[in-house]
Amino acid sequence: MNSKALHKISYGIYIVGSKKGDRYNGQIANTVVQITSEPLTVAVSINKQNLTHEFIQDSRVFTASILSTEAPMTLIGQFGFKSGRDLDKYKGVNYKVGVAGAPIVLDYAVGYLEAEVVKSLDAGTHTIFLGKLLEAEVLNDAEPMTYAYYHAIKGGKVPKAAPTYIAGEIAGEGIKEIKEDAKKVVMELSKYECTVCGYIYDPAVGDPDSGIKPGTSFEELPDDWSCPMCGADKASFRKLE
Ligand code: FE
């Protein structure tokens, strides 16, 4: 069996929100899927250990904000690599409360869904919640982010794509020699991995969300630079051989 076939499945990137009493929580999920059109239902698969799971089980409602390709790693990190048990994830985030009383993140969202749970399926580590759509809205015409885009462009774990990425950038200026030189130099710079969340800093990509240009070595990063995904400091990174 070649489980890599699973990587060929396309997904999006969503912030799934819910509530418990007067508390809100949300998390990044890639498994928001429309199941039927009459009635309109959507399903989401949530890890049982996540606080959002507890909240959905309690309130029986969930929302899904459909993120755009413009969504910064800081937002994805806030909802994907931190726990609502430690902080209020919605602090500093533009959101509204939907008809079901659950929070809907509006920042970098192209649209959103609100659903009421009508069924749930125990899937071992996860629960699949089937929700009847209560509300849905399109917010703008920005491009929805796919899981593949998130990995390849936003600095996920696809470092092999990076040399091509920078070569393409510089080739756009039409200077072939510089392109070859830059490619060589950048490929010699080491990648560093965040030991907290697994984010890989690739000098060929830099950290565009924080204004770090491609070609910046890890050593050249400012001392106060932190992991764009989880916020860990530079000391939390280890060099990849
Ligand atoms: Fe990290």
Image (cartoon, grey):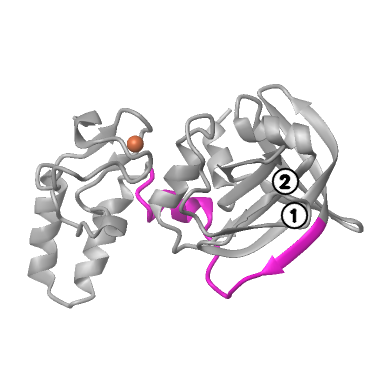
Would residue 36 be counted in the magenta stretch? no
Asked whether 51 or 5 is in front, the reply is 51
Asked whether 53 or 178 is in front, the reply is 53
Q: Is residue 185 left or right of residue 47?
A: left
Q: From the viewer's perspective, is residue 90 above or below residue 120? A: below
Q: Is residue 3 left or right of residue 117?
A: left
What span is colored magenta in the figure?
Answer: 134-156
- Whether the residues at callouts 1 and 2 have beta carbons within 8 Å, the answer is yes
SS at mark 2 in the image = strand
For marks 1 and 2 on the same chain, the one whose residue lies earlier in the sequence: 2
> How far separated are the C-alphas under marks 1 and 2?
6 Å
What's under tag 2, amino acid-wise? Phe
Q: From the viewer's perspective, is residue 53 above or below residue 140? A: above
Q: Residue 159 falls in which quadrant of the image?
A: top left
Residue 44 at x, y percent in the picture: 71, 42
Q: Does label 1 point to a residue whose CB lies under 8 Å from ligand 1? A: no
Which quarter of the rendered picture does the C terminus lie within? top left
What's under tag 1, amino acid-wise? Glu
Disc 1 target residue: 114
Residue 220, visible in the rendered structure: yes
Q: Residue at x 77, y 38 (%)?
A: 59
Q: Is residue 115 left or right of residue 104?
A: right
Q: Residue at x 19, y 49 (%)?
A: 203
Disc 2 target residue: 62
Q: Residue at x 19, y 59 (%)?
A: 213
Q: Residue at x 69, y 34 (%)?
A: 55
Residue lying farthest to the front in this orientation: 22
